[in-house]
Amino acid sequence: MAMTTDTYPNAVSWIRVMRPLAWGGAGLLLLAPWVAMRFTHDVAWTVGDFIVFGAMLLTACVAFEMAMRMARVPSYLLASLVAIGAAFLLLWANLAVGIVDEPGHPANLLFLGVLAVGAIGGGLVRLQARGMSRVMAAMAIVQGGAGGIAIRMDTQESPAFVLAFTGLCVVAWCVSALLFRKASKATPTG
């Protein structure tokens, strides 16, 4: 049962606005490097880069569609958006430049484990709000652990970026967990 006009009168109008923004925004993001390549040699994407980025954007948009269908209350949708955004940022940073050194650094595999926890956990709890709250909390813990191990494995002298990026993701997972928890306690009236 998705958000309905009986439960949340503005839900349908928000959905009508959010859906084209999500898909249109994904299209613009995919188009941005192509346009940039016309003006600078600093951006040099291959066909493979566009395919990978397109697959990431498609996955994020499909996840957004699933969240809209699962959402019974606005806090569930907001929790989902925070989680999708954090997961996208984590994967993009890891693949594009590497969170630790270069993308091929072995420590970067640790951060993919965070996403695996989310994907497997989300499936196990069937995307139900209470379970997703726990999955997001687990992701925050795994993210912190991955960041700590990565800092020890890092060959660079300054761990500031890894620490800051890890902190940003931990905050995002915690915010999402709290919003999912709120969603699990909310009972729509109608």
Image (tube, helix red, strand yellow):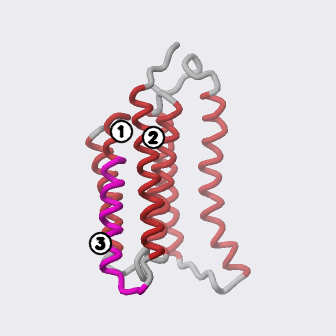
Contact between marks 2 and 1 (CB within 8 A): the answer is yes
Q: Which residues are magenta?
A: 136-157
Q: Is residue 126 left or right of residue 188?
A: left
Given the image, on which type of amino acid does mark 3 rest? Ile
Q: CA distance from mark 3 to mark 1?
A: 29 Å
Residue 154 lies, in percent from the top left, at 35, 81
Q: Which mark is residue 127?
A: 1
Residue 141 coordinates in the image, percent (x, y)? 31, 55
Where residue 108 sits in the image (x, y, percent)?
35, 73
Seen from this angle, which residue lies furthest left? 124
Q: Are marks 3 and 1 in contact (CB under 8 Å)?
A: no
* Residue depicted at 40% across the width and 35% down the height: 181
Residue 138's disc number: none
Pair 3/1: label in front: 3
Three-letter amino acid code at the position of disc 1: Leu
Magenta residues, dominant SS class: helix
Tag of residue 149? 3
Q: Does label 3 or label 2 sit earlier along the sequence?
A: 2
Q: Position of residue 72 (x, y in %)?
A: 47, 28
Between 125 and 167, the one lying in front of the other is 167
Structural crowding at the residue carrying mark 3, measured as other residues with C-alpha within 10 Å and reported as few (<14), some (14–19) or many (≥20): few
Q: Are marks 3 and 2 in contact (CB under 8 Å)?
A: no
